[in-house]
Image (spheres, rainbow, N blue to C red):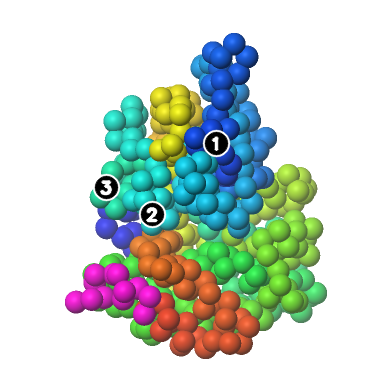
Amino acid sequence: MGKITKGWMIGFLAFILILTGCSSDAGSEEGGDSSNEGSGDTVTLQVGSWRTEDTAKYEKLFEAFNEKHPDIKLEFKPSKNTEYNTILNTELKSGEGPDILQLRPYAAGAELADAGYLEPIDDLNGLDTFPESSLMAAQGSDGTQYGVPLNMSTTQMFYNKKIFDELGLEEPQTYEEFIEINETLKKEGYTPLAMGTKEGWLMSLMHGIVGPSQYGANEFVEKIENGETNFVSDEFKASIEAMDELKAYFPDNYEGLGMEDIRTLFFTEKAAMFPLGSWEIEVLKEMNPDLQLDFFMMPSADGKEPTITTWVDGSYAINANSEHKEEAKKFLEWMTTEEFGQMFTEEFSMVSAVPGVQSDNQLVSDLAKAAEQNSTPYLILVHFAKGNPSTKATLETELQGMYLGEQTTEGVAEAVQKSAESYYEPFQK
């Protein structure tokens, strides 16, 4: 497998021994509803996130923290994934918001930091637990640290093993075989791909899975980092064309389907494949304990190694307006420990950002192994989430337009290139 882009893969390999996830949002006095309770000896901190489905798991984590710090109570106050950014930004601009908040990675988190909404934590005990490549996901544009990494995420093609066995299908080794599998599933009355285009983030996420198989994965990433290629290249255009062609295997009325709809199609076993992230493992198992879930990496269209897409997904930061910053720091310090990493892994079935944590979950373990050997970065998020609107958002909007018949594949590539040229220095030479 080709090397992941400079330094990024080195840090990633240092801790990718387990698997993935994310979280949600809320408020606090002068930063939400933080308050002293009872005799005034207990401080309550609100924790914001976008992972409403993880509430019970976070309560277990918080109980473990509270045993160590009986004077600090944590309340998980998540918001719906698609509403989190808007709610959080509105609260922070008003001097409110949760005491501890989950940061979207890379550029999105840096924007909050640069705006002065977050408390710097360069002096936080335990930060040296993490490699620089994971810390950079929660830094301001000047390199100041604002968040503690929570987990690594992977995206890949989940599939229903029972359906595959029923039809005598095997994991594809080439992109042509992948298309043949889609054709067979469609012919047999199954929805091949559980995907909808209503929510933009699903578009960039799926492109992060499919795209590398077309544009050449890490080799392309290295070239684009050096300004040796761009988004109007034949390689990148091929990735958009592949996205367009795959709509033939989407559900009926896919233009109106969002995350909950496509997840339901998959766990009710009406759809055979689900191109999504590792954080869905536990959610799917809760929805259907009998689901025979497995995954395969995306096979290359040009004979190269298959790929699994990875990135640091989610960090926790402190609201600059919180009245209880010292208490909040104690929680972030706990996040740097192996104890936290192990508990996170066991509860969430995700890859902890804490190095050296092992997983007993076979699927999580297999994903971690695949990521260690065949990882490629989520290019549009890691390197191109800047701009106004961001290049990532541009890709999402243009792909949605393509699926509505309002944009061409070439037009998508040109729009993405124009967005990136506005700030990406290698494109300005």
Query: In the displayed structure, does residue 189 sit left or right of residue 123?
Result: right
* Type of the residue with mark 1: Gly
Q: Position of residue 71 (x, y in %)?
A: 53, 16
For marks 1 and 2, give the CA distance: 20 Å
Q: Which of marks 1 and 3 is nearer the N terminus?
A: 1
User: In the rendered image, which residue does mark 3 sit on?
Assistant: 143
Measured along the vertical axis of the image, is residue 293 above or below residue 390? Answer: above
Residue 357 makes an appearance in the image: no
On-image quarter of the N terminus: bottom left
What segment is highlighted magenta in the picture? 418-429
User: Label 3: few (<14), some or many (≥20) within 10 Å?
Assistant: few
Q: Quadrant of residue 332?
A: top left
For marks 1 and 3, give the CA distance: 27 Å
* Type of the residue with mark 3: Gly
For marks 2 and 3, give the CA distance: 12 Å
Q: Which residue is drawn at the image coordinates 59% and 73% (left, top)?
A: 178
Between marks 1 and 3 in the image, the one whose residue lies nearer the viewer: 1
Q: Position of residue 409 (x, y in %)?
A: 50, 86
* Type of the residue with mark 2: Glu
Q: Earlier in the sequence, mark 2 or mark 3?
A: 2
User: In the rendered image, which residue does mark 2 sit on?
Assistant: 111
Measured along the vertical axis of the image, is residue 57 above or below residue 111? Answer: above
User: In the rendered image, which residue does mark 1 sit on?
Assistant: 32
